[in-house]
């Protein structure tokens, strides 16, 4: 039973110890011919709002310089019917060399790029960036402020949305064999020395296409040095503490993702939607999508919602760990605010306030959401409807039994906010 009490104190609970998360993979699908072609598609990466998918196309006559020139950046936009538009060549950022989006800022005003713009003598400046101008066009790329002093002939990059963490795969001087993974971290305006991930992760084979999740807890990468199902498999490691040195042993994502072909370049959006490339039984790779969810045994949340000087404290019955980790449904998040922050008056005027639910996170955020959907596709349809109503930041979240415990009526919470004004 859930009971709401008026209180003037903050509840404090000791954090639970860190435990490895279990993950589930579902809804694995090859993307349509609006994105995949007879050429090769790889390296997909999605904007945070889920509206634009960038990827690389190789061996295409439509590339700058033709089929035998370098890779080009292409992109597709999510349409109102939840399908992808026919892909377009991002000609303003493509050259006759290899071109690639290696990161996207959270607000989608910056693209981090493989630096194919400075010339071979500037190889140490391996990353460039382009910003979106007022007219919506991308500016000419400039060199990013990180210098790689030890690079081999093969290299790949990933830049976190905030621009302060870079993953490098390269056959550098201290690599164990082919490409190894390194982490660069920027603190107080300065880049630290690279962190080599060591023999648990790096092998005599190659480790490539690293991707850091938005919560900075996990890295996905591809390797042919850990065994598996075929040419290259996709693996995951988890961060074990607040440092960047300690990671779990690699876990193979299994046969739902990995095949006897070449599987790599997995990226994961905050709403559990993953994209990756796989050659399976073809000579060239195509892009696939999947839903990947994690059943984290998280620390108990701070269950106090602050409303100015008043708080609401939540009590709940004790449930088993198994019950807490069960997935329940998808919802559409419209807004997230700190526990002391009130939504703007009128924000919810376009919808029935009785249908709004507030999920009280242990990260200090209240998530104002709407709807409970059995499938991801139904939730996406609803998300598009709310975006048409003006809720442009709406996106889909998957709710676990654990999160479902800590929710309240939107009308009750918003009523207390507005009454205090």
Image: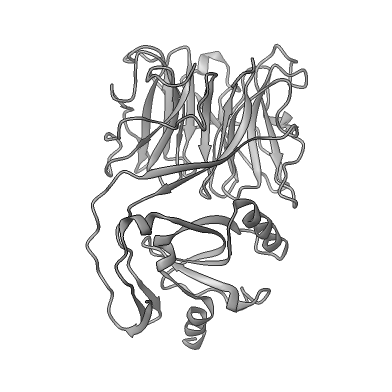
Q: Is residue 64 left or right of residue 167?
A: right
Q: Residue at x 31, y 56 (%)?
A: 321
Question: Residue 331: x percent and y percent?
Answer: 56, 61
Which quadrant is home to the N terminus? bottom left
Q: Is residue 310 visible?
A: no
How is the protein colored in the picture? one colour
Residue at the limit of the structure toward the bottom, as seen here: 419
Number of numbered callouts drawn: 0
Residue positioned 32% across, 64% down in the render: 319
303 relative to 79 in the view: left or right:
left
Examine the image and state in which quarter residue 355 appears: bottom right
Q: Image point 69% across, 48% down: which residue?
A: 134
Q: Residue at x 49, y 29 (%)?
A: 255
Residue 412 percent across, percent down from the top left: 49, 82
Residue 205 location, x and y as percent? Answer: 39, 14
Does 115 sit left or right of 180 as displayed? Answer: right
Q: Quadrant of residue 16?
A: bottom left
Q: Position of residue 385 (x, y in %)?
A: 71, 61
196, above or below 79, in the image = above
Q: Is residue 375 visible?
A: yes
């Amino acid at each position: 039973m859930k009971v709401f009490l008026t209180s003037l104190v903050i509840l404090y609970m000791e954090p639970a110890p860190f435990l490895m998360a279990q993950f589930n993979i579902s809804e694995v699908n090859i993307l349509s011919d609006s994105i995949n072609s007879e050429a090769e598609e790889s390296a997909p990466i999605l904007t945070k709002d889920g509206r634009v998918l960038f990827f690389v196309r190789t061996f295409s006559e439509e590339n700058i310089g033709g089929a035998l020139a370098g890779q080009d950046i292409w992109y597709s936009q999510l349409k109102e019917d939840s399908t992808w538009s026919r892909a377009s060549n991002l000609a303003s950022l493509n050259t006759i060399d290899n071109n690639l989006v290696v990161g996207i800022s959270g607000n989608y005003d910056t693209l981090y790029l493989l630096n194919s713009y400075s010339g071979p003598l500037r190889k140490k400046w391996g990353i460039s960036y382009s910003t979106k101008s007022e007219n919506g066009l991308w500016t000419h790329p400039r060199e990013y402020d990180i210098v790689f002093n030890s690079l081999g002939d093969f290299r790949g990059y990933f830049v976190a949305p905030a621009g302060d963490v870079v993953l490098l795969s390269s056959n550098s001087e201290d690599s164990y064999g082919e490409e190894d993974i390194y982490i660069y971290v920027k603190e107080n305006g300065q880049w630290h020395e690279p962190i080599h991930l060591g023999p648990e992760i790096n092998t005599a084979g190659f480790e490539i296409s690293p991707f850091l999740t938005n919560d900075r807890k996990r890295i996905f990468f591809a390797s042919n040095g850990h065994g598996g199902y075929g040419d290259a498999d996709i693996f995951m490691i988890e961060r074990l503490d607040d440092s960047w040195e300690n990671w779990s042993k690699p876990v193979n994502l299994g046969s739902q993702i990995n095949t006897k072909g070449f599987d790599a370049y997995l990226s994961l959006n905050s709403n559990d939607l993953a994209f990756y490339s796989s050659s399976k039984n073809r000579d060239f790779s195509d892009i696939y999508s999947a839903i990947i969810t994690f059943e984290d045994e998280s620390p108990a949340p701070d269950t106090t919602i602050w409303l100015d000087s008043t708080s609401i404290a939540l009590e709940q019955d004790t449930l088993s760990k198994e019950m807490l980790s069960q997935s329940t449904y998808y919802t559409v998040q419209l807004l997230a605010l700190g526990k002391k922050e009130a939504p703007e008056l009128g924000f919810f005027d376009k919808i029935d306030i009785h249908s709004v639910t507030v999920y009280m996170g242990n990260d200090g955020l209240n998530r104002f959401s709407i709807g409970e959907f059995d499938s991801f596709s139904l939730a996406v349809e609803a998300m598009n409807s709310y975006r048409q109503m003006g809720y442009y930041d709406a996106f889909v979240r998957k709710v676990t039994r654990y999160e479902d415990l800590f929710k309240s009526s939107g009308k009750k919470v918003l009523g207390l906010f507005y009454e205090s004004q």
